[in-house]
Structures are given as C-alpha cells and as structure tokens.
Amino acid sequence: MISANREAKVTVTNLTKSFGDLLVLNDVNFNVGDGEFLCIVGPTGCGKTTFLNLLSKLMPPSKGNICINGEIADPKKHNISFVFQEPSCLPWRTVKENIAYGMEVKKLPQQEIEERLEKTMKLVGLTDCANLYPNQISSSMEQRVAIARAFAAKPDLLLMDEPYGQLDVKLRYYLEDELIRIWQEFKTTVIFVTHNIEEAVYLAERVLILSNKPTTIKAELKVDLPRPRNFLDPEFVEIRKKVTELIRWW
Amino acid sequence: MATTEVNKTPEIVQPKPSTISNLFKNIWFLYALSVVGFLTLWDIAAVTKITGEFLPRPVEVLYQLVDMFLNPLAGKTLLTHLWFSLRRVLIAFVIAVAIGVPIGVFMGINKYFRAFFKPVFDLFKPMPPIAWISLAILWFGINETSKIFIIVIGAVVPCIINSFNGIRLVDESLYDAARMLGANKRQELIEVTFPASFPAIFAGIQISLSMAWTTVLAAELVGAREGMGFIIIMGMNTSKPAMIIGGMVVIALTAWLISVSVSYLERWICPWKVDLNNNQ
Ligand SMILES: Nc1ncnc2c1ncn2[C@@H]1O[C@H](COP(=O)(O)OP(=O)(O)OP(=O)(O)O)[C@@H](O)[C@H]1O
Ligand SMILES: [Mg+2]
C-alpha cells in the first residue's frame, strides 16, 4: 500500500469502534510510512476525530490494533503527539512553557529543551510572544503554539485534527506552507485529518478517503506533485477533482 | 472615499456638549456625588429625627470613632478590639483552609473518598454556622475555643465546595493535551488538575475569609469581652447608636481592605487569570 522505498512506521489493522449501537469505524486497515505526510479526508461527522483518538490511545478501540515500529502503540513507550481540533494550550503556561511542556513530560535534559525551543519558535515565528499567556494571543496563534509543541516533542507519530478548520483562508494558506516547512525540517510522520479536499491535496504525499458512517477507507490516492504546490496547476486541479469525485456519497 | 465622508458627518453635526453634562459623565464626580448625597440624606434624616431618637448624625459617629480610638472602652482601644476580632478570624480561617481545601480536593480527585464524605457533607452544608453557637458554648464554654469553632464551621464550607467543584470542572481537553504528550497520573495531577482548579479554589478561600469575618461578629455577640461584636453589643446596652454605627463602619472598612489585599494576592499567584480579566 505504500511506496516501496519506505518502511512502514505505523500499521493499523482491523480498527473498529462503536459507541453503543452506533458503529463509527468499521474495519479500517492501512499503513503509514516513516516520515510520510498522510492526509485523511472524510465528510463531517464520519468519525475522523474518533479515529485519531483511537490512534493516540486516548480512547480504547472496540477491535483491532495499532502498531508503531511493529509494537502495539503505547503512549508511555511511543511518542505520539496530537494537535486537537480546538486549541488546547495550558492557560497557566506561557507560549514558551507550553511548547516546552511535552519535552518536560518526557524528562529531556534542560539543554536539549532549550535548543529545541529556540529552533521551533523561530520556525513558527513565535519568538516575539514567547512570554505571553495563551489568553493574550489570538486563537490562530494558539493553534500554532499547539503545533509547535507537537513538533518540538519530535514524535514518532504526529496526529493533526483539522488544526486550521476555524481559520480564514489566507491565514490557512500561510500556515499550511509553514507546516510543510516544519515537517521537512523535523522529518516527522504526520497524519493530518481534514474535510477540506484542497487542503488535503495541497499538503499530502498520499490521501486516504473515508466513506460515511460506518466509516471505512474508500480509496487511496498518491499526490506526487513538487512543492511548493500551486492550487491552479492543472495537475493539482485534476487530483482535487478526483478526490471530490471519490468522496461523494450521493 | 464616500464611506469616510459618511462617517465624518455626524461628528461635525454633533453639538459641543455643555460643561454640566460633561461633569455628569465624569466617573469620579459621580463617585463623590454618591457619597456626599448619601451622607447628606443621612444627616437630614438624623436632624429631623424621621427614624426616631436612635439615629446619630454622621459627625457624631465620627467623634465616637475618634473617641474609641483614643480612649479605652472596657479596657481596650478600638484598634485592640479590632485586633481581637481579626485574630479570631485569622486563626479560624487558617484552620478552615487547612481542613477544607484538602477535603474538597480529595473529594474531587478520588471517587471513593467522595462517596464516603459527600453524604455527611451534604447534610451539614446548608446548616447556618450561627445555629452552632449554643452547642459550641455548651461544649467549650464562653471562651476563644467556642468562638473559633463557630467561625471554622462557617468558613470551612466554601473551601470544601469550591475545591471540590474546581477540580471536577477542569476542562477534559486539558487532560487530553497532557495525556497525549505522555503524562502519567502524577504529572496530570500536578501539571493540569492543580493549576486548572486553582482559581476556583482560591475563590473559595476568598469567600471563606468573608464568611469568617461575618461569623466572628455573630460569635462575639454572645458573651465576648472584646472585639468588634462586643463594641456593637456595648453600644446597644448603653444606648449609644453612634457606637454601633461606628463599629459597623470599621467592620465594613476592614472587610473591604481584606478583600482588596486578597485580590492582589491572587493577581500575584495566578498571573494568567488576571490578564484575562484585564483584557475583557
Ligand atoms: N464519546 C462518544 N460517545 C458517543 N458517540 C460519539 C462519541 N464521540 C463521537 N461520537 C459519534 O461518533 C461520530 C463521529 O464523531 P467524530 O467527532 O469522530 O466525527 P468527526 O469526523 O471528527 O466530525 P467533525 O468533522 O465534526 O470533526 C458522530 O456521529 C458522533 O456523534
Ligand atoms: Mg472532529
């Protein structure tokens, strides 16, 4: 399922989740390669957040397994980061302390923390507001702090749940470029969930398309375009149309 | 261009406000007006004896205060009386916080502890602390212990309620944020539960302090030989309303001073919360 030159970092087998009688995820299987940028698109309410909650082990699956490097995923052992749909900074920590938080939890040496902090904040352009509290910055800024925090922890797997869903288009374009830059710098394995097809095609190396509930993987599509990508490039438009076609359920 | 002009027009048309209406928009002027107005009405009521014999004029209250400040009443000056009340409040307050906050916190964190304590607590919660006075006197006699006991009873309840609710109402997503970064239970507690519930716990402590200040008066109304409650009772027994009102003024001023200093303390301890208040 994935390109031959890459080892599978994450393997998901028979992943199933139901809430009572409501079957949300039905037997999902896929792999993610090491350092891959994978986008998952699906209609609103199809279970994307649930899906990521399972991957991050915040929620137990009804059935199935998630393996990282061949072992069953375990947040204590593996390093999984999550950028939530809603901003999730800790209000009592400044921007800088929030970004350091994941590294502190993992008990990294202070010097390493400082180095990564500086690099990350420069990359995300947060150096100027390092000492502000989350309620003193805008919610888009806050989301960038959450993203910086996630990358700075150098996760084995980074899960992103529509992090730019609430933002206006112009800012989103800017942050998407920024995201790609950080990803290229840190070489993190990313699963990025969105319901925005254009965003998915712009970011992804590969796109998985989810069906409606009960959700399965309906199709998979490689996006082999050079970066930075252009929304008006005929090839780009072609792929976008294909995904749109695949996602239709009527 | 057109929009600018439309925006400009009303400004030009608007008449220059007169100085008088300007004055009435000045907050400080209104503050002063409110205080002076109140004192004037009070003075008129006192002079015309609308409410009978027992309303002193504001100046008389002032004289009485100065008198109590300089000359001992039942062997103690006003400041000494105030200190006796304050000391009772502080001792009882410290005890109440030391008991109430841990109980509330444990009730919030541990469901077995909660199941064990909640029924008894719910039973005692609605009981007014003053209802305990008679029992306290029977148990401990008319002394410091019984007074402090009553104040503790009054002050402990808000500590428990707020600590408990503060911890139960921590935003679940903050826990998720910590968990997904790999935090263990202890890190969750220290990094999320405590800071997130801190403002609520602190608010409980604040309420508890003003409860203590309210209760001390009730405790001192019964058989105290010193304190602000004693001054008020003394004023009643000797038919000196100026003394009663003077005592009330001192009580109010002290309570106000305490609450101001506590909110400064809070600003210092939780800077993130204060910024929120300032911005909104
Ligand atoms: N804890 C839960 N208990 C019961 N049902 C749930 C729970 N969490 C989610 N669901 C249901 O599962 C389905 C998928 O929810 P989910 O939030 O994963 O969708 P989503 O694709 O992330 O939606 P959105 O696009 O709005 O973010 C919904 O029908 C929802 O009602
Ligand atoms: Mg969602």
Image: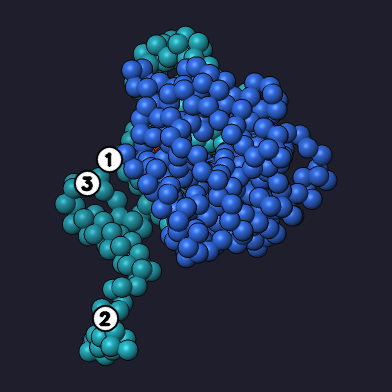
> SS class of the residue under badge 1?
loop
Labelled pair 3, 1 in contact (Cβ < 8 Å): no
The amino acid type of the residue labelled 2 equals Ile
Q: Which circle marks residue B20 in the picture? A: 2
Q: In x, y percent, where is residue A72?
A: 64, 21
Q: Which circle marks residue B53 in the picture? A: 3
The amino acid type of the residue labelled 1 equals Trp
Q: Chain of mark 3?
A: B
The number of numbered discs placed on residues in the rendered structure image is: 3
* Rendered position, B151 above or below A151: above
Question: The chain drawn blue is chain what?
Answer: A
Give me the residue at 18% from left, 46% from top: B52
Of residues A52 and B20, the one drawn nearer to the viewer in this rendering: A52
The amino acid type of the residue labelled 3 equals Glu
Q: In x, y percent, where is residue B107?
A: 50, 19
Query: Where does label 1 land, which residue?
Result: A250
> SS class of the residue under badge 3?
loop
Q: Which numbered disc, 3 or 1, marks the residue closer to the eye?
A: 1
Distance of label 2 from label 1 (alpha carbons):
70 Å
Q: In x, y percent, where is residue A111?
A: 83, 46
Whether the residue carrying mark 3 lies under 8 Å from ligand 1 is answered with no
Give me the residue at 59% from left, 24% from top: A66
